[in-house]
Amino acid sequence: MRNNSRAVFMHYKKMHESGEFSRLYTYIHSLMTGVSVAFFIGLFSAGPTAVSCSIYLLIAAILFSFSLALNALFSVFFLFFGVDKQITFKLYTYNKLMNHLSNFSILLPFIAFVLLFFYFSHIIGWAFLIFLIVIFIFTAIIITQMLSKDNELHKFKLNLIENGNISEYEEFEKLHEFPIFNDDERREMSLEYGLLVLLKGKLTNFLNKGKFDKENVELMKGELISSLINICNTRAGDHELNLRIKKAIDYFGKTDLKECEIKKHVNEIISKIDNTGSVYFLI
């Protein structure tokens, strides 16, 4: 499975740029805050003895209290800082703790509600959990089928490129791409992907020839430098990919070269392209 899809990330970034992300999370956290408050209003009317009589209700109350605190904090955060799109983008993209806390605060009320089902009836609670497991199984089947279909489309598009059917490929891409990009975005993504495909092809040919003498290594070093310059002039690749290319260039410049190390550097770049760089729009 190919991760970090360029198309998904671009769509995610557009959500931040348009303010849609902040509006969505403001609504979700405000809703979860309201749900938690509603629970405690009902709990207060039942009296403190109700909590002491059931471990399910006690744990549910604790989870709802955590939910109330976290969701209220996130609601206040988006109220004051949601307009700053750069802050929200950086926090939710590069800060794992922020992401985990946000997701945890949204998940807490759902866990608490499951416990409330058990509080009222074990039959209802277990029926809900079994149904939830069935839903997860069906979801896993659907995702597996979707990934299998994506893999078929990926292979088909690669076959079009390898056979030189560029016009057919472009029509196929326009038909199946999602989200839909404008002409400028599509041209830039095509350029980025083309650079990475070209680099991978050169590296693969270099390995297949099996000639790792100084002259061929110098030629490969020149190709890497040229590719790195071209990639840096676009948005292609990522920081780790660029570092791997630079690392290979530095090693190829040494006098004492070992075949196993040369192959290692080349395979690391190819692996990085396969895992992240080559899925800009071959999703």
Image: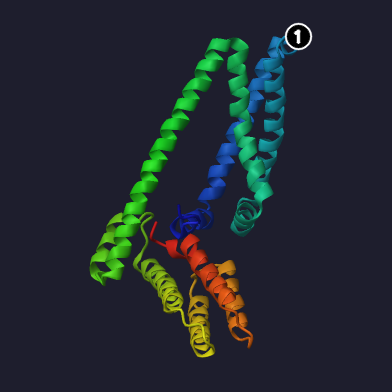
- Amino acid, disc 1: Thr
Q: Horizontal and vertical percent for residue 255?
A: 63, 88
For this view, does 252 lie left or right of residue 162? right
Q: Is residue 44 above or below residue 110?
A: above
Give the colour scheme of this rendering. Answer: rainbow
Q: Nearer the viewer, residue 19 or 263?
A: 263
x then y, percent, for residue 237 = 51, 69
Task: Assign the C terminus to one quadrant of the image.
Answer: bottom left
Report whether 96 appears left or right of 282. right
Say whether residue 270 is visible. Answer: yes
The answer to whether 116 is drawn above or below residue 166 in the figure is above
- Please, which residue is most extreme toward the bottom here? 215
Q: Quadrant of residue 69?
A: top right
Residue name at image x 44 percent, y 75 percent: 199
Q: Quadrant of residue 238?
A: bottom right
Name the residue: 54% across, 89% down: 214
Q: Is residue 138 left or right of residue 29?
A: left
| SS for dot 1 | helix
Number of dots carrying numbers: 1
Is 136 rendered above or below residue 155?
above
Which picture quadrant has residue 242?
bottom right
Any part of residue 245 in sight: no
Reading the image, the residue beneath label 1 is 49
Q: Position of residue 87 (x, y in %)?
A: 64, 57
Identify which residue is drawn at 61% across, 38% down. Answer: 29
User: In x, y percent, where is residue 127?
Assistant: 50, 16
Within 10 Å of disc 1 (Cα), the crowding (few <14, some 14-19, many 20+) is few
Identify which residue is drawn at 52% across, 79% down: 228
Residue placed most toward the observer, 174 or 243? 243
